[in-house]
Image (cartoon, rainbow, N blue to C red):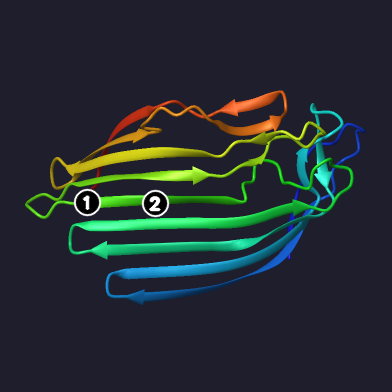
Amino acid sequence: MHIGINSGSGSSGAAFAPEEGRGWEVGLSGRWDGLDVGVTAFDIEKSNVLTTDPNDVNFLAPVGSLRSRGVEFDASLRMGRRWQVVANFIWNEARNNDDTFATPLALNVPDQSGTVFVVYRSDAGREWSLSGGVSYVGERSGATDTSGLLLPGYWKTKAAFETPLTPKITFRAEADNLLDEHYAQSSYNSNWIYPGAPRTLRASLRAEF
């Protein structure tokens, strides 16, 4: 059983009760020549989870009961010494059982999400790597009020390049949202929606001592 502290108070001025939760998780994994696969099923129920107050968006309010159940799938496929494919998929049905809220959908939680990445590693001299892939976030609730706001699902691409400069220093360059897609990342209510970040480029050096 999980118990967490909820700080602050709601629109009435009353302090929040602590968050409580319990659940179970069971998984299976297998490994074959070049292939690793894992599947996990989970069922978690929580009470007093704070979210946007459907009657006053300037405050938070506790959800009486929130249940999250689903399946997560992970796989890694190695093809020879140079190529690797990594995939992840989650189906998560997160629903509340509280008539105070206009929708049973948990705020900003998609039913489906996943990623697929391909990695190539060189096989000559100092090893460098090039990777790229796509991530998907499905449709999800964007408000707890009666607006019925649903944030549309979106796809986002990434790429990265990494190479050693010396035996102890490694250079890495990354590009996030490579195709510069416009999407809604999350929402607080129907009037407060966070846009996803535009194409972002990063470069870094990692030193080992």
Q: Secondary structure at mark 1?
A: strand
Residue 177 locus on image (x, y percent): 40, 33
Tell us which disc is closer to us: 2 or 1: 2
Residue 137 numbered mark, or none = none
Is residue 198 toward the left or the right of residue 24 in the image? left
Q: Which residue is mark 2?
A: 116
Instruction: Tell me how many marks there are.
Output: 2
Q: Residue at x 58, y 57 (%)?
A: 91
> Camera-side residue: 198 or 60?
198
Q: Quadrant of residue 188?
A: top right
Q: Could you tell me the amino acid type at mark 1?
A: Tyr
Inspect the image, locate mark 2, and give the three-letter code of the amino acid beneath it: Val
Residue sitting nearer the eye, 24 or 3: 24
Q: Horizontal and vertical percent for residue 9?
A: 84, 36
- Mark 2 and mark 1: Cα distance apart in space: 14 Å
Observer-nearest of 172 and 119: 119
Q: Residue at x 68, y 65 (%)?
A: 43
Residue 173 higher or lower than 70, as above or below: above
* Image vertical order of residue 101 relative to residue 179, above or below: below
Tell me, for residue 120, which label it has, or none: 1
Give coordinates of residue 50: x percent, y percent: 76, 43
The image quarter containing residue 190 is top right
